[in-house]
Amino acid sequence: MRHILFLAWRYLAYHPVTTAILVGAVTLIAYLPMGLNILIARGADDLTSRAESTPLILGAKGSPLELVLRTLYFESAIPEGVPFGETGRDELLELARAVPIDARFRTRFSPIVGTTIDYFEFRNLRVASGRWFAMLGECVLGSEAARIAEAGPGDAILSASESVFDLAGVYPLRMRVAGVLEPSGTPDDRAVFVDIKTAWVIAGWAHGHAPLDGAASAETILRRDDREITANAAVAQYNEVTPGNVGQFHFHGDQNTFPVTAILVVPTDGKAATILEGRYVGADRPIQMVRPQVVIGELIGTVFTVRRYVVMALTVVGGATGLTMALVFALSWQLRRREFETIGKIGGTRRRIGLLAAAEILGVVIAGAVLAGLLVALTDGIAGWAARWLVRLA
């Protein structure tokens, strides 16, 4: 038997291109269904666990899926904003705790999430180094965001401009890093957290500039009266909040009307959640209350339906590939008829010739199976990352 295996090995090694093509075909036939199942299963687990940990989300009427994905993963399209004042409505606060989320902005590499300290308590997040943000303009980095930005407590990072062509837009805000969070294995690891008011500074709803009542600023004054001072565009605006200029930052307009991406609603119990859902069903205000678990469940149901059709297609393709491989081997054996006749003349029996052909097929199948197994292990390792990448494309 050892000699048969040696001859089979030498034949496959002598025809590397043909062997590589056959091994690749076996690898794909074996890997694609398993890899697809792993990606979908791991992605479904990640999506479901995050959704199950979030009872309710309040946001502007529109696509519930976009609202949920932006609120839970800080990715996907940005939904319409909901007024911050919704967090203080008596009909909401008597039954739940409201946590605002403003996830419209980014640094160069990570999403910026404006929220309150309640968010960290709700998600059970802990500071690994440094402290929580305590002043306007400070931020706390997720562990992955800190690694990517190569930043830690005491460093500074910049928010990204919404458009490189918006020359008259809001200046990027230089934010001081107050702390870095412990790894949580969730999308929070990739985020840069700031106070909700800092997010409004980034949005341009607040700004700070040099005092206008001094002699140095006289040339920037357009009009002055007893109630207000109007300055021209030459007035210097601050792009960083420091202890020295924090008092110069002020908000324009009613803060209750400022938009946030969504509001995390944490009811006191299941009954309170049901009551709240009922209050917001068909409300005359342009807002909606959604259960993330239901929305993600519908998404996963759609994905599993598509998966069944994909697996059916892969089965058909796999069968066709198997028949093609059988044809390749059959034609190969026809071309090798004289070789087999020579083996017979030197004492090789039909049984040994058959074993030689079977050994060649087995070698191709084993090599393909090993490669498929390696790909499956690799897929299992990156499945979480792949699921997050797919969420970003949603």
Image: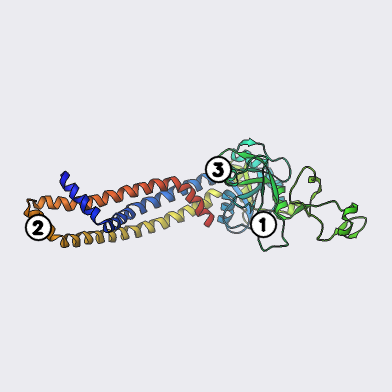
Q: Nearer the viewer, mark 3 or mark 1?
A: 1
Applied colour scheme: rainbow
> Gap between marks 2 and 3, in whole Å?
70 Å
Please tell me whether mark 1 sits on a helix, a strand or a loop.
loop
Q: In the drawing, does residue 230 fall left or right of residue 373?
A: right
Q: Residue at x 72, y 57 (%)?
A: 170
> Would residue 212 be found to the left or right of residue 126 on screen?
right
Instruction: Identify the residue at horizontal 28%, vertical 61% (top origin).
Output: 320
Specify whether residue 54 is in view: no
Q: Quadrant of the N terminus?
A: top left
Residue at coordinates 59% horizontally, 54% vertically from top-left?
Answer: 67
Q: Amino acid at mark 3?
A: Ser
Of the residues under marks 1 and 2, which one precedes in the sequence? Answer: 1
Quarter where residue 80 is shown: bottom right
The secondary element bearing badge 3 is classed as loop
Q: Nearer the viewer, residue 179 or 284?
A: 179
Q: Are marks 2 and 3 in contact (CB under 8 Å)?
A: no
| Residue at mark 1 | 161
Measure the C-alpha gap from mark 3 to mark 1.
32 Å
Q: Nearer the viewer, mark 1 or mark 2?
A: 2
Q: Are marks 1 and 2 in contact (CB under 8 Å)?
A: no
Find disc 3 in the rendering and name its residue. Answer: 53
Percent position of residue 127, x then y: 62, 36
Q: Which residue is mark 2?
A: 341
Amino acid identity at mark 1:
Ser
